[in-house]
Image (cartoon, rainbow, N blue to C red):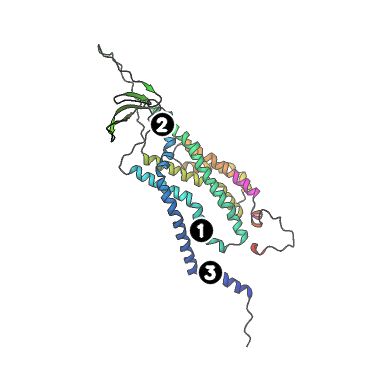
């Protein structure tokens, strides 16, 4: 007896559908691969965490030095600097390892996408990575020096009452301390000088004795700062937390072109129509700048202005890369009427 005729298309669809258990197994495998790839990066990041911490605190040290203040941060607990360096190692591991994690996520979802749908990811992922890098560079090179200079100068502008002057007692002579741009090349114990580049009063004392009985010279220092009503000494962990929060805010804010492209490609909005509401977009940028940054006008403007510029950039990108062009591929011409679409575009 001849059975009912089978539909080859349904058979092909049944073979292509993966059972739910297999989906979970594939997800578990991709998560394990992601963690295995991040582990060596974390080990390397921990090894360079000290250099990374020096790199992160360099802007605040430079800003303090430019304001004539002592460029040293303070530690108020035994584990503060170590935990801060460890936190930076975790963040750098996530940032550097994010392409590997995204690749594993792509390997999980790619089998369920058509070829024309994959082309959108090929545009969005590199664009998002480039914008994230641009955000961190903009924060480190532009925003931090300006914001830190503003806050430091505001603190130094609060002057204390001037100290009264008194005449020197008879026979008293004030000592003279040489002022140098650095430490002397060859110094013996008991010498005192002022290092203007470090803003420190430094004293050479006998150090440890080596195996030949020769005592080394060790330099002790005392930080000097301008006399004002507020002594500005920043904690390592508080500054690092400020830096990481600003980096996250800018990394998210600089994804504006990606959001504009996604909304335009899905048809939810027409970016060209949004140009009629530039004032509203500028207002939203100001609100986001106030929410994502510390509560000061300078930080808000330094994020709001790039957000608006990036919105305009997203509109330009959408006009250059409409959904139809991305879907058919950049090297292909628009199909003529009556042409059959590719199998991957169905």
Secondary structure under tag 1 reads helix
Label 1, label 2: how far apart the Cα atoms are: 43 Å
- Left or right placement of residue 20 versus residue 324 in this view: left
Instruction: Assess disc 1: are there few (<14), some (14-19) or many (≥20) residues with their C-alpha within 10 Å of its C-alpha.
Output: some
> Would residue 96 be visible to someone looking at this image?
yes
The residue that mark 2 highlights is 64
> Would residue 280 be visible to someone looking at this image?
no
Q: Position of residue 77 (x, y in %)?
A: 30, 41
Label 3, label 2: how far apart the Cα atoms are: 60 Å
| Residues drawn in magenta | 313-323
- Left or right placement of residue 309 versus residue 290 in this view: right
- Residue at image position (49%, 65%) is 26
Q: Quadrant of residue 224?
A: top left
- Residue 18, labelled with which disc? 3
Q: Contact, CB < 8 Å: mark 1 with mark 2?
A: no
- Residue 105, labelled with which disc? 1
Label 3, label 1: how far apart the Cα atoms are: 17 Å
Question: Is 176 placed above or below 138 here?
Answer: above
């Amino acid at each position: 007896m001849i059975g009912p005729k089978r539909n080859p298309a349904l058979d092909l669809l049944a073979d292509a559908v993966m059972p739910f258990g297999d989906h979970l197994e594939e997800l578990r495998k991709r998560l394990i691969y992601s963690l295995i790839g991040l582990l060596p990066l974390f080990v390397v990041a921990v090894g360079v965490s000290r250099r990374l911490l020096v790199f992160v605190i360099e802007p605040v040290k430079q800003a303090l030095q430019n304001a004539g203040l002592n460029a040293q941060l303070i530690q108020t607990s035994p584990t503060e600097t170590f935990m801060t360096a460890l936190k930076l190692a975790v963040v750098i591991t996530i940032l550097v390892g994010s392409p590997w994690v995204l690749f594993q996520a792509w390997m999980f979802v790619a089998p369920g996408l058509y070829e024309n749908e994959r082309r959108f990811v090929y545009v969005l992922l590199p664009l998002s990575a480039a914008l994230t890098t641009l955000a961190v560079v903009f924060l480190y090179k532009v925003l931090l020096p300006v914001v830190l200079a503003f806050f430091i100068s505001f603190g130094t502008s609060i002057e204390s009452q001037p100290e009264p002057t008194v005449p020197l007692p008879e026979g008293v002579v004030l000592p003279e301390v040489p002022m140098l741009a650095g430490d002397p090349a060859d110094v013996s114990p008991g010498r005192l000088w002022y290092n203007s580049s470090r803003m420190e009063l430094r004293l050479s004392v006998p150090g440890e004795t080596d195996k030949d009985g020769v005592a080394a010279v060790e330099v002790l220092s005392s930080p000097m700062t301008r006399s004002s009503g507020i002594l500005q000494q920043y904690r390592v962990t508080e500054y690092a937390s400020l830096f990481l929060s600003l980096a996250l805010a800018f990394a998210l804010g600089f994804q504006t072109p990606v959001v504009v492209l996604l909304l335009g490609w899905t048809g939810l909005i027409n970016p060209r129509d949004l140009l009629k509401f530039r004032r509203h977009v500028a207002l939203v940028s100001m609100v986001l700048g106030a929410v994502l940054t510390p509560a000061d006008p300078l930080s808000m403007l330094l994020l709001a202005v790039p957000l608006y510029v990036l919105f305009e950039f997203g509109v330009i990108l959408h006009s250059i890369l409409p959904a139809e062009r991305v879907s058919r591929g950049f090297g292909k011409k628009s199909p003529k009427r009556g042409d059959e679409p590719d199998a991957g575009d169905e």
